């Protein structure tokens, strides 16, 4: 490493040190919240809270019918599909292919591996906690796996937030980066809410899924910020030539 490169590395490290500390503190706080929530769920302390919310979303005279107009149920059913494996797999593959074609090989490989390992983490948590699906209200869609954390909530948070955070790094303008991240958060939130409305998850399942997914995306963003270049090789060369002139 030349003296110029060493100075540049130290400058970047110093510039991002406060952001790194904030990120690490957020991860530590999120892990604590997730641990406490999991503990409360295992002890059954959250059941009353979950029951009140699920019942509030159904008509008192018929628990099989959700509140709101008929079109809302159809809309929520469509929204929940955005957190399904098929949609998220297609999205991940297409964005990875785009980054590969754009000659951003390191970040493309990192995006794909981050999402894949996040999905594996979600499946592992479900097996470890082994919470059955809620039977407080009739389910509006067919489900068969375990409940905690919500796979749709966590996997959509992992996928949308990870893709949003890493893809935003490749955008030139701050406004574009903000839009990408805002859209990612919005999609993760509405997918999680749809699972509660459909009665297939306890609210605490969804909260845990959001928390775990956000933690995973935050950790991936931190790693990529430190070690994964966001520029294509030719762009990095052009930037270097521009700095030298």
Image (cartoon, rainbow, N blue to C red):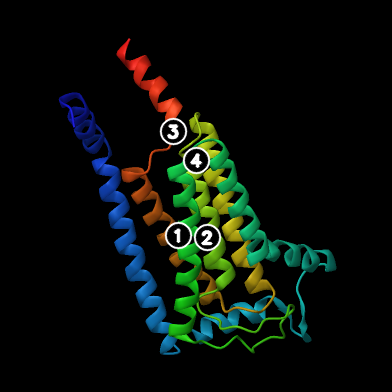
Q: Earlier in the sequence, mark 2 or mark 3?
A: 2
Of callouts 2 and 1, the N-terminal one: 2
**Residue marked by disc 4:** 168
Q: Mark on residue 225?
A: none
Q: Seen in the image, is 201 located left or right of residue 128?
A: right
> Which residue is drawn at the image coordinates 37% and 56% (left, top)?
219
Residue 231 marker: 3
Tell me how far mark 4 sits from mark 3, CA to CA.
12 Å
Q: Nearer the viewer, mark 4 or mark 1?
A: 4
Is residue 208 visible to the viewer in this orientation of the structure?
no
Q: Mark 4 or mark 1: which comes first in sequence?
A: 4
State yes or no: discs 2 and 3 in contact (Cβ < 8 Å).
no
Disc 2 to disc 1, C-alpha distance: 6 Å
The alpha-carbon separation of the residues under discs 4 and 2 comes to 15 Å
Front disc: 3 or 1: 3
Secondary element at image label 1: helix
Q: Which residue is mark 1?
A: 214
Q: Quadrant of the N terminus?
A: top left
Element class at badge 4: helix
Asked where in the image residue 197 lies, by quadrant, the reply is bottom right
Q: Is residue 242 left or right of residue 14?
A: right
Residue furthest to the right in view is: 70
Tag of residue 157: 2
Residue 86 horizontal side relative to residue 178, left or right = right
Residue positioned most to the left: 3
């Amino acid at each position: 490493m030349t003296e110029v490169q060493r100075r540049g590395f130290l400058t970047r490290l110093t510039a991002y040190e406060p952001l790194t500390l904030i990120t690490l503190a957020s991860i530590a706080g999120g892990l604590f919240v997730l641990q406490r929530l999991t503990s409360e769920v295992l002890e059954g302390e959250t059941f009353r809270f979950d029951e009140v919310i699920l019942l509030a979303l159904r008509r008192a005279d018929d628990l099989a019918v959700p509140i709101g107009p008929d079109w809302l149920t159809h809309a929520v059913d469509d929204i929940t599909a955005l957190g399904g494996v098929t949609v998220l797999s297609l999205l991940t593959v297409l964005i990875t292919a785009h980054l590969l074609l754009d000659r951003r090989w390191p970040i493309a490989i990192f995006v794909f591996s981050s999402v894949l390992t996040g999905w594996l983490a979600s499946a592992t948590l479900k097996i470890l906690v082994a919470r059955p699906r809620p039977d407080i209200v009739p389910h509006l869609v067919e489900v068969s796996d375990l409940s905690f954390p919500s796979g749709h909530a966590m996997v959509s948070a992992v996928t949308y937030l990870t893709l949003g955070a890493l893809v935003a790094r490749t955008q030139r303008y701050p406004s574009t980066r903000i839009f990408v991240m805002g859209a990612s958060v919005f999609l993760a939130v509405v997918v999680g809410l749809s699972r509660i409305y459909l009665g297939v998850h306890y609210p605490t399942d969804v909260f845990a899924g959001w928390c775990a997914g956000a933690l995973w995306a935050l950790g991936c963003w931190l790693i990529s910020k430190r070690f994964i270049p966001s520029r294509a090789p030719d762009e990095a060369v052009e930037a270097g030539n521009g700095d030298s002139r």
